[in-house]
Image (spheres, rainbow, N blue to C red):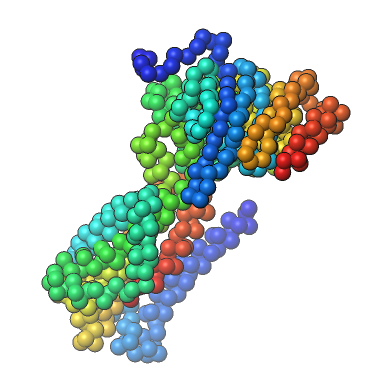
Amino acid sequence: MSARISARISARTLRYLIVIGLIALWELLPRSGLIAELFLPSLSSTLMAGWTDAGEYGHALAVTLYEVVVSMSFACGGGILLGAIVGSLPGPRVLIMPMVSSLYAVPLVILYPVFTVWLGIGSESKIAFASIYGFLPTMLATAAGIQTIDPQLLLAARSMGATLSQRLVRVIIPAAIPTVLSGLRVGGALVIVGVVVSEMLISSAGIGYLISRYRTILDSAHVFAGVLLVLFLAIGFNAIIRWIERKAAIWQTGTRGGQANDEIASGAMQPAT
Amino acid sequence: MQPLANVTPLKPAARAGAIEVKNVGQVFKTRSQDVVALEDVSLEVKPGRFVVLVGPSGCGKSTLLMMMAGLRQQTAGTITISGAPIPQPDPDRVGVVFQEASLFPWLTAEDNVEFPLALRGVPKAERRAKAQDALKLVGLEGFGRRHPHELSGGMKQRVSIARGLVQDPPVLLMDEPFAALDEQTRMTMGDELLRIWAATGKTVVFVTHSLTEAVYLADEVIVMSARPGRIVDHLQVQLPRPRTYEMLSGDAFGSLRDRIWRHIRKSA
């Protein structure tokens, strides 16, 4: 037992050391001239670039955040709703699941130019694209979560006189939460990818737009400042999901939800551009 | 509570806990054919008896239990519990204990035991008190705050039994409750169940695959044949109570077990 704990502690310290080492390398390699500043600007010059144009980055972050939050509510709300329907009714399942599965193989980013034609190059087209992008894994996870509920639990609830609505509220929803959350984790990450990528392609605002614009004028420090912001966005999102997971799924021993998570994650990461 | 007009009133207390199964049949309709799971099954269980159903896999013994629980309706015949038919689950009359994994993993042991009470809106304080009593009865006092994954297999089944007993129904139906447990735990749980049964005086119908368990626990053993399920023997186990481990090697025990085994080998 104590050996395991000490192994975990050292693994954790090791992780920190690796991160610190990478940060140090980021500063030292460009400074020593081993890597040209054009390819990798040093950390200090990246931070400096971000600091001097803080207003511009702040505005871009606000635009991106707005798009992420709206897309995420569409993707997660729609994904959970449709996933619940598909997961609990065999009719829609037979109809929809094969379509969704084949849709998974399509690089959805090809739709983005179409969205800009329909919705313009403002936030609307990013939200439409990112919502659809994050919707699929959320829906699939919710459907899987509801389909894989142990029928013994439902039978036990029925034997105790639970009505249909009591079974839904007291059994189906709590039993599905861990799998749904793991779907939200993947779906939410894809929403961020979707927003940033679409901003980089055709856009007039947002962090992706800034990265793309500074790249065309070869201002690497400003490009990396944008990259750093996206990184923080993703880390922040992950922290929020972790917090929800801890709150909502204390009972989860990691077997069922964990498996579903891996399965979905490996499938979902394919279409990332 | 106001009695509903269309509910058959329960007969006097003398019938409480009695089970009557008359000419019951069950046919599963599949697309290609009709499968007869049970055919003309009749049996009577007197209040307070411990009855064990045994038979080869697929003989319909679990199906019969599900019908007694109101979880499935027979296609022929009648079943009455405490003198009234059971068209749907009625936890006031029948408690059900399933195989291992039927506890809700997101609830603590005491919340699991309170679950049937919570479904009917029993106030929190009363619920907690009843759950504590039930947990105490099954020997789990002080474990109420644990989640199922923090309990051993035997403890989980104790929680299941407590959940089945919490509304104090006269009948307890048990569907292979100890099947997933290891041999030693299974023996201990058998003794525990007999202790709880003696303390509460419930009518118990217990489904199992284990012939030893059947003879060890039962007042009566009902042997069923393979599909279509029929009753092929109904044994009275005259061994004295309390049952002890030494009886397992006795002649009386052995001959009862052999008799059941011959029926099962014939039909399997």
Q: Choose between B41 and B6: the one closer to the eye.
A: B41
Q: Is residue B106 visible?
A: yes
Quadrant position of the C terminus of chain A in the picture: bottom left
Residue B60 in the image: above or below residue A12 = above
Residue B83 in the image: above or below residue A255 = above
Q: Choose between B176 and B44: the one closer to the eye.
A: B44
Farthest front residue? B33
Residue B222, quarter of the rendered image: top right
Residue drawn at the location 67% of the way across and 34% of the way down: B224
Residue A187, quarter of the rendered image: bottom left
* Rendering coords of residue A154 (x, y %): 46, 40
Residue A97 in the image: above or below residue B23 = below
Residue drawn at the location 57% of the way across and 40% of the way down: B36
Report the side of B162 relative to B189 (left or right). left
Residue drawn at the location 65% of the way across and 33% of the way down: B230
Residue A229 in the image: above or below residue B154 = below
* Rendering coords of residue A76 (x, y %): 30, 56
Residue drawn at the location 79% of the way across and 32% of the way down: B259
Report the side of A233 relative to B257 (left or right). left
* Rendering coords of residue A181 (x, y %): 38, 54
* Rendering coords of residue B85 (x, y %): 49, 22
Q: Choose between A107 and B132: the one closer to the eye.
A: A107
